Amino acid sequence: MRAERDSMGEMSVPDDVLYGASTQRAVLNFPISGRPLPEPFIRSLGLVKLACARANEELGLLPAARSGLIQAAAREIVDGRLNRHFPIDVFQTGSATSTNVNANEVIANRASQLAGEPLGSQRPVHPNDDVNLGQSSNDVIPTALHVSVAVALHARLAPALRRLAAELSGRAEAFSAVVKIGRTHLMDATPLTLGQEFSGYAAQAAKAADRADRAVARLRELAIGGTAVGTGLNTSPEFAARVCRILSAETGLEFVEAANHFEAQAARDDLVEVAGALAAIAAALTKIANDVRLLGSGPRAGLGELRLPATQPGSSIMPGKVNPVMSEMLVQVGLAVQGLTQTAVLCGREGHLELNATLPLLAHCLHEAIHLLANGVTVFTTRCVAGLEADGARCRELVERSLMLVTALNPLIGYDAAAAVAKEAFASGRTLREVVLERKLLDAATLDRVLDPGRMTGPG
């Protein structure tokens, strides 16, 4: 152990860590979940510290040598090399001040190492005066949260959703000639092609990717520059714009200074909107996964219109059983994400006066939701959708047995007469064709043309 000091006095800190006294206090104060804040958030926090140091150097407020040390240490955080030095629990101070101080201490101590000074010396870089120059936890943490979530949406979730949309579009094209019976209310409806059905899933996935992109755009305004309550006390009027320019260059995303710093620090409405987008994406994916599971049910006593890839044995007692495990996985992901996003919405309600005090929990919920969705979609795409096959014979069998082909008779014999035909066919076990011919409602040639399922898959 070594001795470190903060404004409250001396603390013993493990020799092998880069954090200092204030972080150690938080470690002892919050032994709650055992879960630190998400790695993508910590990396973005490092990036924000790097950008702040560079901006302060540009403004002549921080000597180049000190700025260089801060940036070098912060870059190691960005690269994920210092993750173990960020141990503070998710359930901590609501502003995540502990984590901001954690970053300040890690960067200052790493700068001491790089400069050949002892840990805890606060030479040549001071954690507050230098690393935190022109900043407050109240603007740094919301900024890191916006940046980290935007990067995760852009780099992980949106591409995964686009791959799913492309794979579903490929299946739609492959299944374009497979005519099957439609179902509404889980009951027989008029025919469509399996390709048309899958085109709907592809459109859902494409819209989900668009929602992820729009969510990125909602996060472009950053709170940095507002310091404690939004007034910008103790920072340069030019600081925020410079930090945003540097963050934009580093990430390839467009970030700008918040139009109103009081809104940017007191409210988390943009993140609530992102949570809503993630909930909509989860709902779409759950619908697709459930439909694939239903269409592949069987293989003999279910719908059986799809043949799902066999990925693993499905039962410890029933030999040869194969289950739709990839669909079940994605459904569970969707349920978990719905819970996480609902918690994020509730966090957004917890803003009081000049600060929302649920920032660590927001970071956990949103990053966990994106992580689950991106991984779940990727696995579902590669291990399920890419290997889906149509059972054309089964699709034809179910179409031919369906009574809802009678809908095509409406323009020729009227709704009431068509309904009577369907009821008699169902009650007697005969086909629609047999009943219509017996009643002499249409001739055989007309009936063959009108009851052709392929003609029913389009207008007319």
Image: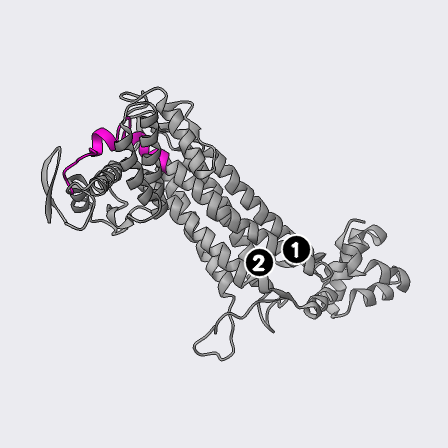
Residue wearing tag 1: 197
Q: Quadrant of residue 237?
A: top left
Looking at the rendered structure, which numbered label has been put on residue 291?
2
Residue 277 versus residue 122: which sits nearer the camera? 122
Q: Is residue 137 magenta?
A: yes
141 relative to 88, above or below: above
Amino acid found under the numbered disc labelled 1 = Glu
Residue located at (21% from left, 29% from top): 129
Residue 350 appears in the rendering: no
Residue located at (48% from left, 61% from top): 328
Q: Residues within 10 Å of mark 2 (few under 14, many from 20)?
A: some
Q: How is the image coloured?
A: one colour
How far apart marks 1 and 2 lie (CA) works out to 10 Å
**Marked residue nearer the N-terminal end (1 or 2):** 1
Q: Is residue 59 left or right of residue 157?
A: left
Q: Secondary structure at mark 2?
A: helix
